[in-house]
Image (cartoon, helix red, strand yellow):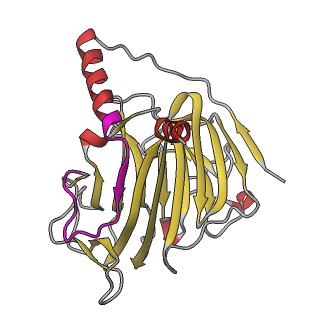
């Protein structure tokens, strides 16, 4: 039987754009539509700089390499060590992200699929490897987290974060990292938020919605998502071909610097000693409009 959780939130913001900005956004949207299908199997010797933006990646700490010795199948490995920072003294960041000219407008429905795994000592606090962000300094509206070595997925309704699924808990026992007395164990304010929160989020679970452990081997993830701060948001999650959860409601950050969203992958975490590596392979992105066009052509 499916399980549902209903939580409500009632705040909003107005965003005003000038005609000049609106014209620029239209041009960006047209460019994004033209490049909305992306596919990367990392079979070249180096990362495709047309696809990936490297400003937050550390030279010498990422490489395309065979999955196993003498194998022809390749992957990208992104590594941190005790000497790396990238986001302050207490923080480590080494990430690649979708290049700006391939980024979609927030609210565009798209499907992302990829394979990943992790190696190295888990951080005892914040760790993100795989996240979808808007043009904002705020939190990702969808993220793969590995706090304390536990794989979990969170969605964001403005300043309110909801833990959707976990690798060590059924939905009723999901953990939170910043629990407060007046909210559930898996709904809590994002970093920097000063008050309690209620999220307009609804969750429907699959039959066995416990996530696989990426420390034990490759995990194949598929996300169908559509950001929407107006209550029209959607995130559907599959892990190793198994349906995990469907999330609907208000998904996204209201205050942003621009209209785009982007995917980024690597390691973003609080400082931890030792070496850790995130591996990525078989990345693909398609949009709902492309799926409809293919169906009509058949």
Q: Is residue 288 above or below residue 186?
A: above
| Rendered position, 252 above or below 244 | above
Residue 164 against residue 126 in the figure, above or below = above
Q: Is residue 210 left or right of residue 258?
A: right
Q: Is residue 79 visible?
A: yes
Residue at the limit of the structure toward the top, as seen here: 19
Q: Residue at x 35, y 86 (%)?
A: 68
Residue 170 at x, y percent in the picture: 72, 63
Residue 172 is covered by the magenta coloring: no
Q: What is the residue that sits farthest to the bottom in this orientation?
A: 69
Residue 199 lies in quadrant: top right
- Tell me the residue at 29%/89% (across/down): 70
Query: What residue sits 33% from the left and 85% below the top?
Result: 71
Q: Of 280 and 183, which appears nearest the observer?
A: 280
> Foreground: 297 or 180?
297
Res 169 quadrant in image: bottom right
Q: Which residue is drawn at the image coordinates 44% and 68% (left, top)?
A: 116
Q: Quadrant of the N terminus?
A: bottom right
Q: Is residue 186 left or right of residue 178?
A: right
Residue 296 in the image: state x and y as whole percent. Answer: 54, 36
Q: Is residue 62 left or right of residue 17?
A: left
First to last magenta residue range: 32-50
Residue 160 showing in the rendered view: no
Percent x, y of residue 272? 34, 72
The quadrant the C terminus occupies is top right
- Front-most of 94 and 228? 228
In magenta stretch: residue 39: yes
Main SS category, magenta section = loop
Pinpoint residue 158: horizontal percent, then vertical percent.
Answer: 50, 35
């Amino acid at each position: 039987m499916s399980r549902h959780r209903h939580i409500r939130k009632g705040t909003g913001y107005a965003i005003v754009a000038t005609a000049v900005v609106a014209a620029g956004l239209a041009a960006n949207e047209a460019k994004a539509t033209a490049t909305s299908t992306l596919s990367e199997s990392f079979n070249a010797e180096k990362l495709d700089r047309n696809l990936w933006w490297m400003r937050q990646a550390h030279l010498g700490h990422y490489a395309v390499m065979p999955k196993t010795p003498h194998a022809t199948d390749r992957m990208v490995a992104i590594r941190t060590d005790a000497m790396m920072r990238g986001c302050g003294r207490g923080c480590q960041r080494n990430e690649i992200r979708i290049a700006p000219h391939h980024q979609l407008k927030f609210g565009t429905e798209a499907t992302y699929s990829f394979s990943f795994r992790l190696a190295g000592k888990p951080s005892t606090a914040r760790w993100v490897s795989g996240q979808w962000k808007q043009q904002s300094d705020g939190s990702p509206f969808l993220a793969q987290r590995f706090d304390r070595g536990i794989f979990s997925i969170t969605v964001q309704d403005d300043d309110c974060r909801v833990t959707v699924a976990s690798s060590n808990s059924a939905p009723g026992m999901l953990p939170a990292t910043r629990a407060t007395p007046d909210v559930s164990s898996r709904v809590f304010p994002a970093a920097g938020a000063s008050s309690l929160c209620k999220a307009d989020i609804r969750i429907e679970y699959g039959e066995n919605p416990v996530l696989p452990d990426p420390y034990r081997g490759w995990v194949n993830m598929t996300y169908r998502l559509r950001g929407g701060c107006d209550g029209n948001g959607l995130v559907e999650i599959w892990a190793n071909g198994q349906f995990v959860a469907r999330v609907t409601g208000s998904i996204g950050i209201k205050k942003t610097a621009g209209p785009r969203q982007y995917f980024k992958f690597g390691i973003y975490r609080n400082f931890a000693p030792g070496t850790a590596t995130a591996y990525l392979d078989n990345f693909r992105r398609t949009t709902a409009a492309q799926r409809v066009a293919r169906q009509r052509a058949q």
